[in-house]
Image: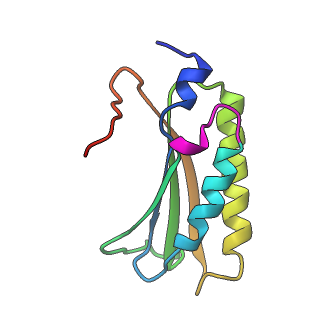
Amino acid sequence: MDTNVDWLSSVVPHIQVDHSPDFDPSPLLPLLTTELSAIESVDPAAVKAYCRPAAAFSPGTGAPKGFIHLSVCVLAGRPGSVLAQMADRLDSVARIYLAGRVPYPMSLTLEIREMNPQTYRKGEVH
């Protein structure tokens, strides 16, 4: 596997924000994009952030009424310390922004997903 940092920074990452259907966290996207872009091995021009509202949501008994889940997809090969830094910094930005802006208590989760560079494809369509 090619783990050259220059190559890794030229593709991805995706910030996917899944959320309950009755809350729009889209104003958070530019903040997450800016924070991720400032991290070692991330090319700002490669970052893509988008929201995906759930068509339906049914929490378990005693769970918060709503949710926000951030998935950050990056190509495998970065050191664990860089991945942890991504998680910590994005989690902090999300918590600071969302505090006091959610209509009711919501679950906030975040994960860093590593994608296999041997099977990931990127290009443009016109």
Residue 83: x %, y % from top left? 64, 35
Q: Residue at x 58, y 73 (%)?
A: 27
Q: Residue at x 40, y 78 (%)?
A: 21
Q: Residue at x 30, y 73 (%)?
A: 55
Name the quadrant containing residue 20.
bottom left
- In the picture shown, does residue 54 fall above or below 71? below
- In the picture shown, does residue 125 fall above or below 15? above
Residue 67: x %, y % from top left? 50, 70
Q: Which residue sits furthest bottom?
A: 103
Q: Is residue 16 visible?
A: no
Residue 39: x %, y % from top left? 70, 40
Name the quadrant containing residue 112.
top right
Magenta: predominant secondary structure element? loop
Q: Is residue 4 visible?
A: yes
Number of numbered discs on residues:
0
Q: How is the image coloured?
A: rainbow
Q: Which residue sits furthest top?
A: 1
Q: Which residue sits furthest front?
A: 126
Residue bounds of the magenta highlight:
39-46
Left or right? Give the position of 73 relative to 103.
left
Q: Nearer the viewer, residue 117 or 47?
A: 47
Residue 9: x %, y % from top left? 57, 30
Left or right? Give the position of 116 relative to 107.
left
Residue 106 belongs to magenta span? no
Q: Residue at x 70, y 66 (%)?
A: 95
